[in-house]
Image (cartoon, coloured by chain):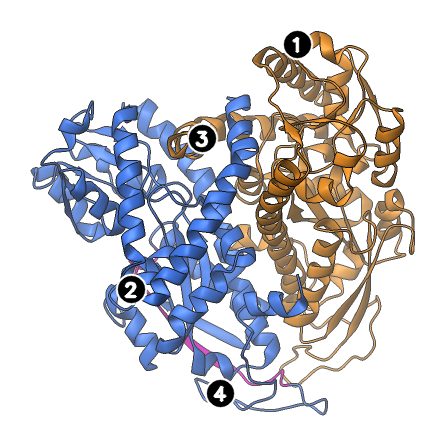
Chain colours: A orange, B blue
Amino acid sequence: MKRRDFVSKLGLGTVAGAGLLAACGEKTTQQDKSGKDFKTEYQWKMVTTWPKDFPGLGTGANTLARLIGEMSGGRIMVKVYGAKELVPAFEIFDAVSGGTAEMGHGASYYWKGKSEAAQFFAAVPFGLTAQEMNSWLYYGGGMELWHEVYEPFGLVPAAAGNTGVQMGGWFNREINSLADLQGLKMRIPGLGGEVLKRAGGTPVSLPGGEIFTSLQSGAIDATEWVGPYNDLAFGLYKAAKHYYYPGWHEPGTTLEAFVSKKAFDALPEDLQSIVMSACRIANQDMLAEYTARNNQALYTLVNEHQVDLRRFPDEVLDKLRSLSDTVVAEVADKDPLSRKVYESYKQFRDQVIDWHEVSERAYLNARG
Amino acid sequence: MKRRDFVSKLGLGTVAGAGLLAACGEKTTQQDKSGKDFKTEYQWKMVTTWPKDFPGLGTGANTLARLIGEMSGGRIMVKVYGAKELVPAFEIFDAVSGGTAEMGHGASYYWKGKSEAAQFFAAVPFGLTAQEMNSWLYYGGGMELWHEVYEPFGLVPAAAGNTGVQMGGWFNREINSLADLQGLKMRIPGLGGEVLKRAGGTPVSLPGGEIFTSLQSGAIDATEWVGPYNDLAFGLYKAAKHYYYPGWHEPGTTLEAFVSKKAFDALPEDLQSIVMSACRIANQDMLAEYTARNNQALYTLVNEHQVDLRRFPDEVLDKLRSLSDTVVAEVADKDPLSRKVYESYKQFRDQVIDWHEVSERAYLNARG
């Protein structure tokens, strides 16, 4: 890898030189004799799509802000806002794009209305796992494409969290065949929802806070959320007698941070590197946290709350897989940039599957 | 997670305050009026166990050094030395402990002569994958134990790279049954070597640079190295007609960085955070690189060089797994600290296997 590539992966490809006076949120400006600026202090706002301090997702945004403060010796202090504190969850993209805040934390599939291609940087049914996503983003051209997708909005993107494989969800009936999906009303957003629709179900979109009540009242028959750690926190096992199934639709959901390009360009180079580096740590750290906590939460769900853990029949998985291929491929038809991202993603996916057949998958099966 | 835990995970648990005068490698010292020190410059040496610029491992050490320089705005410049440039590969631990260099990059299983417990922080046969290792280290108590193991040597450890699942190796005969392992002379170090020995083989230890010739001459019957990317670079497929097998002995080898505690304590807090943060990025970045490059290299090996990719029979894997359990458990008998680390590792492993049965493993098989 050339040095330039690495710098570009950190999002430093098109930066202005160090020592530029800051246009956004600065408090004090001074340069030392070397011309390096270690004294300007920045006060940033980070808006998020999560309830304040929400376990894993919201606390991951807090971790990111804290790291930026620590590494910069307090030269950038980032204040984190939960959904609705400054702007509603699904307005954070516009808020940072328009300059209301310097930074955002969310998930790129929320912005498919801005660009269909954005969905590839979060989660794709039967797509890449967390490890594979990071490999595509940092060494497979993914990050460069993500920059291209967000550039028209004046935003610099970064991967900044990962949930790992999400669970397939909670169902009020056993799924023994494709027939059991017919008419199933399920809270499942994005591409996964479209797949369910083609399999005969009815996907609905609900914010997290409304899931429990909808499931309990019978307004929906099924729901997915994240995984044991978050599902336990929401008490979904109490909503009704439900069957719990492993996942297929979000195999390693990447969370994102994005920074106003104007604010980013105004930083000296070392602070630009610190902001992007903090995102990379947050990216890894959240996955490590979910891996440890899902584990404990699953124990609690199964052993203390007698949750009925099942497995989708092969017939159902085969159908969902083939429908997913179709649904994902159709995104490429939306516009030329979506096609470019789809083709990069698909090529990487096909190859890494072959490698993981003899490494990750073969190993997990051998370990048994 | 409490704030204290996160700081401790970054290795900042026992640091001196900011603004302390540096004892090691400093060039200039100045403090601004706030008492914060943004001006002292540090020149550090990083000694490594890898040949200079060795793909993946050596270039990963370079990445780490570069990140520290970038994030610190040049306040710490780290010069990387390949094996034998300053000290031989297996003397870097003593070199940093003794103050010859400020920092080292290697793998903790090389130091089992210093502490048997060190082996758990690199790779364990049928043990944790890369994702699981990071989870144990950052959220399962692993990092705290690693600090405890290295503390008597005046070293602050960090995870700073991961190869992912390593391949089982190259064999001059098909392994169709346990009988084929009898008398097999194989280059395989550490706990994996001990397992092979108990299965009837003869493990030998050889530095990377001697593997090709030994395999070609027939001095050894088999060897493991890393994976397709590194094995292709070494040209192992040319050494003889060989069968290539998936791995079991190093399922997610963690590479390490360690820093002289004296040098670390002398840094202001922001630079301490930067050094430890750079390690975390290097940790993730190397895994992303291997995941992408192994993939391409495996294609080349199989399609261009007609490498014969096989699979160990279940009988062989079952035996290796059961021998591994015994060999790993015996490490706990060496000393109380080894027992403490073993018990933490084993408890985490047992639980995360259960979670990954219904997430990572179930998903990879469903995608299959």
Span highlighted in magenta in the image = B37-53
From the viewer's perspective, is residue B30 above or below residue B349?
Answer: below
Q: Nearer the viewer, residue B158 or A45?
A: B158
Q: Which residue is mark 1?
A: A177
**Which dot marks residue B291?**
none
Q: Position of residue A307 (x, y in %)?
A: 67, 32
**Which dot marks residue B111?**
2
Q: Which chain hosts label 4?
A: B
Q: Earlier in the sequence, mark 2 or mark 4?
A: 4
Q: Earlier in the sequence, mark 3 or mark 1?
A: 1
Q: Residues within 10 Å of mark 1 (few under 14, many from 20)?
A: some
Q: Which residue is mark 3?
A: A361
For mark 4, give the secondary structure. Answer: loop
Q: Position of residue A248 (x, y in %)?
A: 63, 26
Q: Position of residue B192 (x, y in %)?
A: 26, 45
Label 3–label 2 contact, CB within 8 A: no
The quadrant of the picture occupied by the N terminus of chain B is bottom right
Q: Which residue is mark 4?
A: B27
Q: Which amino acid type corresponds to the residue marked 1 in the rendered image?
A: Ser
Mark pair 3, 2: CA separation: 30 Å
Mark pair 1, 4: CA separation: 71 Å
Observer-side mark, 2 or 1, equals 1
Q: Which chain hosts label 3?
A: A
Can you see residue B287? no
Report whether mark 3 lies on the same chain as mark 1.
Answer: yes
- Say which quarter of the image contains residue A231: top right
Mark pair 2, 1: CA separation: 54 Å
Q: Which residue is rendered at x = 48% and y = 55% of the image?
A: B283
Can you see residue A270? yes
For mark 3, give the secondary structure. Answer: helix
Label 3–label 1 contact, CB within 8 A: no
Observer-side mark, 3 or 1, equals 1
